[in-house]
Image (cartoon, grey):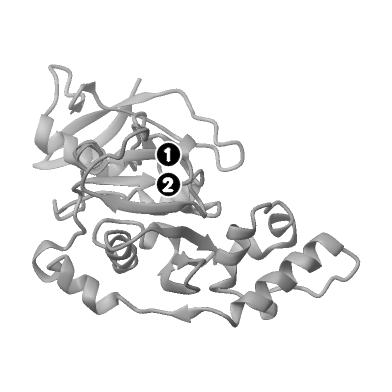
Amino acid sequence: MGQQFYGCAYDIEKKTCCVVNADKFHANCYSFSGAVRSIHYLLRQAPYRIMWVGDYVTMKENISKIIREEDLLGLSTIYDQYYFKNEDEDENYYKKASFIDENNKQWKKINVWDISEIYFDYENTKSVKYEGYLINHTKKLAVDLVNYYEKSKSYTKNHETFVVDLVPPLTETGGGIEILLLNGLSTQTTEEFASTWCGDLLQIVDKLPENYSLIDCCFLEAVSRYRFCYYNFGVNSEDLIMDNNGLFSAVTLSLRSRKRSYPCYIKAVIEDGYINFTSSD
């Protein structure tokens, strides 16, 4: 079945949170997704801690690895004792599970689904805004959203433009990015950033604050990206697909080790009026 994910924004001091069902990671991590829209709306209003929470995090070995109290509080916006085994012999696990259960009852839930739809004019745009900066107050880091969008544009089968949004990969609790990129990824993808902002205090602002460092990240699933590249950048003399900075190249990612395969190029072959894409060394 795979794990179920939830987009979660929470304010520890005010004890308010917004939790949105995000289904499977690869189903709702895009610029057109309602869960992404809700979280983006909140981040444009105020700073929130963000977690894109997958159910596997409740497993004993995963809970035991969590150190920060603010991360356990994030999990408490979703889970209570029902999700945990009562294993008294493991004191560390039992204490953390109990802490999550106790705090689960204290949150005030907010719902911004409808207002976020109006805010982003979703009926017409079918996307959140990629303007300004996503900043990480915890780590003093930032991403230029205009730059991210331009590097990450992809096509659906119907040639509609979208991007894999950066918030779910950066803040996921684990396992989502590997499934998203199961069929390959552009070599430009920065999968090493996955999960590194999980539970951190984030915000979307118009201007880059002083003493914040920009990071250059993108998350590009291979097929949708090379589809975009073919129609926007074309091919070279050998029918290899171009990208904005040369030839498009892709790799596969090991589910267990996250190690990349050897890169390959993508060739466009037209047969009987149809375009087929094949890998080429």
- The residue nearer to you, when weighing 87 against 229, is 87
Of residues 108 and 143, the one drawn nearer to the viewer in this rendering: 108
Measured in 3D between alpha carbons, the distance from the residue under mark 2 to the one under mark 1, in whole angstroms, is 5 Å
Q: Secondary structure at mark 1?
A: loop
Q: Is residue 257 above or below residue 34?
A: above
Left or right, 136 with reference to 98: left
Q: Badge 2 is on which residue?
A: 137
Task: Work out whether 119 lies above or below 240.
Answer: below
**Residue underneath mark 1:** 140
Label 1 CA crowd tier, 10 Å (few <14, some 14–19, many 20+): some
Give the image quarter of residue 31: bottom left
Foreground residue among 144 and 227: 144
Q: Callout 2, which amino acid?
A: His
Task: Kindly identify the residue that appears in the image at 54 percent across and 37 percent down.
Answer: 254
Give amino acid for label 1: Lys
Q: Are marks 2 and 1 in contact (CB under 8 Å)?
A: yes
Q: Quadrant of residue 275?
A: top left
Q: Looking at the picture, how far across and down is residue 186, in whole percent?
A: 34, 33
Picture layout, residue 93 above or below residue 159:
below
Q: What residue sits 35% from the left and 79% below the top?
A: 111
Q: Position of residue 204 (x, y in %)?
A: 29, 52
Q: For the C terminus, give its image quadrant.
A: top left
Judged from the image, the secondary structure of the residue bearing numbered disc 2 is loop
Q: 66 left or right of 123? A: right
Question: Which quarter of the figure is the N terminus placed in?
Answer: bottom right
Residue 274 at what x, y percent from top left? 13, 43
Question: Relative to residue 88, is residue 160 drawn left or right?
Answer: left
